[in-house]
Amino acid sequence: MPHVFEIVAKDGAGRVGKLYTPHGIIETPAFVPVINPHLPVISIHDLKKLGFELFITNAYLIYKDEKLRELVLRKGIHDAFNWNKAIMTDSGAFQLMVYGDVEISNLEIVEFQSKIGVDIGVILDVPIYKGSIDYRKKFINETIRRAKEAYEAGYVTEDSRTIWVGPIHGVPYPSLLEYSVKNMTRYPFSMYAVGSIVPLMENYQLVQLIKSAVVVKSKLPTNYPVHLFGAGHPAMFALFVLVGFDTFDSAAYALYAKDNRYLTPYGTYHLRDLRYFPCDCPICTEYTPQELMKIDSMHRQHLLAMHNLYVAQAEIRRIRQAIYEGTLWQLVAKRASSHPEIARAYKWLLDKRNLKAYQFFEELEPVFKNKGLMITRDEERYLPVIRRYRERIIDRIFLWSDKVIISTPEGSNDLPTLIGAQVLILNSVFYVIPREIRHVYPLFQHMSPYSGIDSSALDFTERFIEYLREKGVKEIYVYDTREENAKKLAERLNIEEIYSGQDVGIISQEQEELFRAKAILRYQFGPGAEDIIEKVQIEYSPTTGRLRKIFAADVTKEEIEKVIIPEIEKHIEKREKLGKPIPSDPLQEMFIDKGKIWLLAAVTPMHFKLVPHPLLAYRMWQKFRDELRYMIIINEEAEPFVRAGRTVFSKFIVEVDKNIRANDEVFVLNEEKDLVAYGRAILSAREMMDFKRGAAVENRWGFKR
């Protein structure tokens, strides 16, 4: 089963996905509870009631129990457990770690898992937690040897019914992790897992674990689901998902319950210390802490375990929702308040010196999100979307004047809209924001407790000013409503002039709208994109006053023939189906009578970006098809379906602009580089090329031949 995973939604390196197993589809991220076949604290019925789609049990313990072994061999593991959903089994590696040896070989336990029909199985890997790099490498080599052994024996194969997991070891050493990934990916595993993390988890060494995760996820192809062994506290789930883990297992829910410990997403309580339950699960609404303390210990353990699983499931749902919203970083920030080591790991990910982590996230982080940024910590001024903006704006600013006014936020609201100097707004988070694009994500859509402009912002602005001068800007002013503030700022930025009403010219409303449209186009699609328009009309929202639609007023005869008439024909078809009146002369009424303007793009109130319409797609294709900017190429098999408006699937993509990120607006071409469609990228460029299953682009419009 080589291709068992697809992505549905993304944020950070986290993904809501579908894991396809022989017994159903598992929605990820997913917590996988460990079920002890001999001492189950909760029943299979309980798991069903809690909504779990997958659990993990120990194949080695089942094998060692003669009666249980005979039962699962005779009935299969699903019937033996009375469970019609997916089952994952571990191979005995934990026992190998604890006792130093197990009474079974790698091939024996692999064959046993195959015979009893597990959905997800693991080879008998060799965990290693101590010793020098060379010493650890010997054990990693043994796991690699066993992977090869399972492959050559015909178990780990492309057509295996079982999803075989390739264990990755070497934590916390990058060289060992890279070595493990390089060698384990030589074999056709459908899933990978990071192991040997127990000491890190027990000692809350989360920074080491997160560093290791970044290494592994950077080296692994993106189309594999990745499991984390032994990670069970809900407070850490969001962090693990953020760095790219799709599933994680633990028996902590039961072990904690045995010790009367009560889990929450923000920490752990001992039952005796609680006067009230901070939870609305069925257990916490039926009992008080005092009542639970008085009941039989085994029954209490069961009830606490149930509560702990309710909390785990609720946190998983919360994480999935955060991914859809684009607020996963925000959720991790909340969880960072629950433990200093989570906070340390979060801070490490956002350290401005941490280029490796930034590059990892930048490649996977969506460009546009459904919700704005909520910044509550210093390190969050280096969130990937913010750092990406600072990198891009240098190259993507549209300069339309040789006069620039650098203004404080308060001052920018005071400056006239039609002033002849370009206004750049200083910002405590994004540093410099051209006024023309201030409503584009994520510039307007953020909240921050920071109001002052710190030294980092001022240093960036100084470099930006040098760039402006290199690009031909001749006059630079500083402005604030309070002159004293403006003088201090000018002195810091080595600018001589304060703006106090000097004649810098006036532009027309028509020019202002054109410059704004050009600025947004260049920022979203890069240098040169602004050249595709020369005359526009803009429509504003009647409620917010913000830009909502851009109409081209410079339509050519070729565009009328190749874009506008076919688009009108599609609109007429829709009207016919809906029983709506049809114009007697559609081109006259829908184009000529309206001033010969045509819709170029809309600015969506959800993602706060330009969404192209066919005319913009056509112009972008004409200008950038040779360099494939924001373009993907599909094979001839998919072309007719994509032209008909169907989704673009990864397996049909043959080439892609490497700079595409999730939620970018992209243009779809065939192998002759003809325009086929345009739509929203669901995946990044790297993921589009890695995945052979699932959607890559949500089709907005297909072009007929």
Image (spheres, helix red, strand yellow):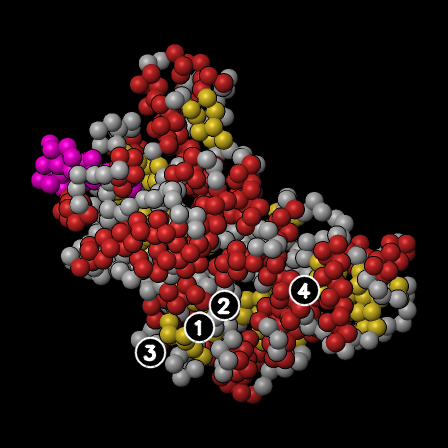
Q: Earlier in the sequence, mark 1 or mark 4?
A: 4
Q: CA distance from mark 1 to mark 4?
A: 27 Å
Give the class, few, some or many, for how many residues have Cα within 10 Å of label 2's Cα (few <14, many ≥20). many
* Callout in the foreground (3, 2): 2
Disc 2 versus disc 4: nearer the observer: 2
User: What residue would you read off at disc 3?
Assistant: 636
Q: Answer yes or no: do the residues labelled 1 and 2 have beta carbons within 8 Å?
A: yes
Q: Which mark is residue 660?
A: 2
Which type of secondary structure does the marked residue at label 2 adopt?
Answer: loop
| Type of amino acid under label 3 | Glu
Label 4 secondary element:
helix
Q: Which residue is mark 1?
A: 656
Q: Nearer the viewer, residue 610 or 111?
A: 111
Image quadrant for the N terminus? bottom left
Q: Is residue 55 left or right of residue 516?
A: left
Q: Which residues are magenta?
A: 54-78
Q: Which residue is mark 4?
A: 437
Taking 422 as reference, is 246 above or below it?
above
Mark nearest the camera among 3 and 1 is 1
Amino acid type of the residue tagged 2 in the rendering = Ile
The disc labelled 4 sits on which kind of residue? Ile
The vertical placement of 610 against 119, above or below, is below
Amino acid on which the number 1 mark rests in the picture: Val
Does label 4 or label 3 sit earlier along the sequence?
A: 4
